[in-house]
Image: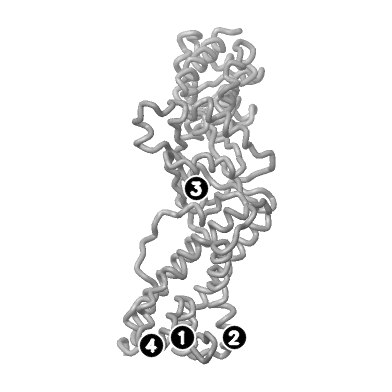
Amino acid sequence: MSGILKNVVENFLASAERDQFNGTPAASLIGLIPRELDLRNEIVNLLELEHIDCVFSKRDINMHIRRLPVLAISDQITEARREDLREFSIYPTGKAVESVYDTSKWNDRPFSKKLLIGKSQLDFESFDMAVLERYTADPRYQVHFEDYMGRMSIGDDAFSQMGFPSRDKVSLQTFGLGVDRDRFPYVIVFLRYLANLSPEHQQLWNSYTAGQDVRMMRPYFQSSIEGNFWKNRSARYAIIQEMLLINRMTDAIFGQKIFRDFEEAEVPIGITSFLRPTLANFEAFVLALDKHLSERIDTKFFNGKIEMDEETPRGDNRFEVRRKGSIRLLEDWLLSALKWPDEELVKKVIVGPLKEVRRLRQKPAHEFSKDNFSLEFHRERRRLLKDVLNSLQSMRDTFSSHQGRCCETAA
């Protein structure tokens, strides 16, 4: 082994033991081969032998880590001949590491081992959604979700608890959403963050590794790789925005908001895409979606506009007076307050999806259901979100052309 390669390997292994996986700046090797041309020739020779890789600052913001997949060998050779020695770092390939080091010592840390033998820190692994249930089911962990990404960490109380095992004091700075060719969702995590897990949790995650061809969702790529916040949000986010717009419109037209004031709060797991397609998870999704919808309808909005109660026959010419539910109040008000060319279409397009969500929510409340796994639950989830979004968009379109108080004021 040449002196250059020995230095590069030893530096990298020492850094790996500190969980950093840093390269060796090319300029620091000038002490081993003082003549710059000779040093460059040796670097090129090691590249051709596939013993090293080079990371160039002109291509990556941080040449001191192997952040992204390296260039093709031919491109690396071209850059190594002409780039300033201070502007690139050198890493041993997996081939070089394994020739002098027993990498089986890292078998208990499978993701750290991948960084050791040449994988890039932003290479990612994909996992079955079930892996998150280890943490969402344990209140000692905090799992936060957004549309296409999330993060996980041990809670402060558990972290400071002396009796809580150190192996379980783990966190993931971020995880994202990936899909296969059938648009089936998976959790994806960069190797850099997986390598921060304890050996026990690395093995846990490794047991849920997905074998399918999974691709990162573009919004997660934009935010985590490009550093740009995504422009296209999820159906869940669009539903919230539609409700906020409808509130602004009804407040301008009628002087009241139809939905209770709410903030764009953190996304509950039940309404995210980070769930396995099981009956139990689908029921949790329906419950969360119904809370987003019917429970936010402000029944005070309908006072003085329509009948708030209805009589239900009980037999023997007796009737029971009951307060109408929020969705029924919305339906009666829409049909009485606004003119529609087709009232049945209103019931189907606008009110129908809200009623379906409520019906699906009430079903598990009145019977025991055996849990099961089916891709159909994932498809049904997407369909419900699409129908609800279409419902709210249709409602907003109607209000946008309403000749109400806002128009009178403007006149």
CA gap, disc 3 and disc 2: 39 Å
Crowdedness of circle 1 by 10 Å Cα count: few (<14), some, many (20+)? Answer: few
Among numbered discs 4 and 1, the one appearing first in the sequence: 4
Q: Position of residue 224 (x, y in %)?
A: 48, 43
Please, what is the three-letter code of the amino acid marked with disc 1?
Answer: Glu
Looking at this view, name the residue that lies furthest to the front: 316
CA gap, disc 3 and disc 1: 45 Å
Mark 2 sits on what residue? Answer: 344
SS state under label 1: strand
Mark 1 sits on what residue? Answer: 310
**Contact (CB < 8 A) between labels 4 and 1?**
no
Asked if residue 316 lies left or right of residue 264, the reply is right
Label of residue 305 in the image: 4
CA gap, disc 2 and disc 1: 21 Å
Give the position of the N terminus as an image quadrant. top right
Asked if residue 130 lies left or right of residue 28, the reply is right
In the rendered view, tell whether residue 31 sits above or below residue 272: above
Label of residue 149 in the image: 3
Q: Residue at x 54, y 25 (%)?
A: 112
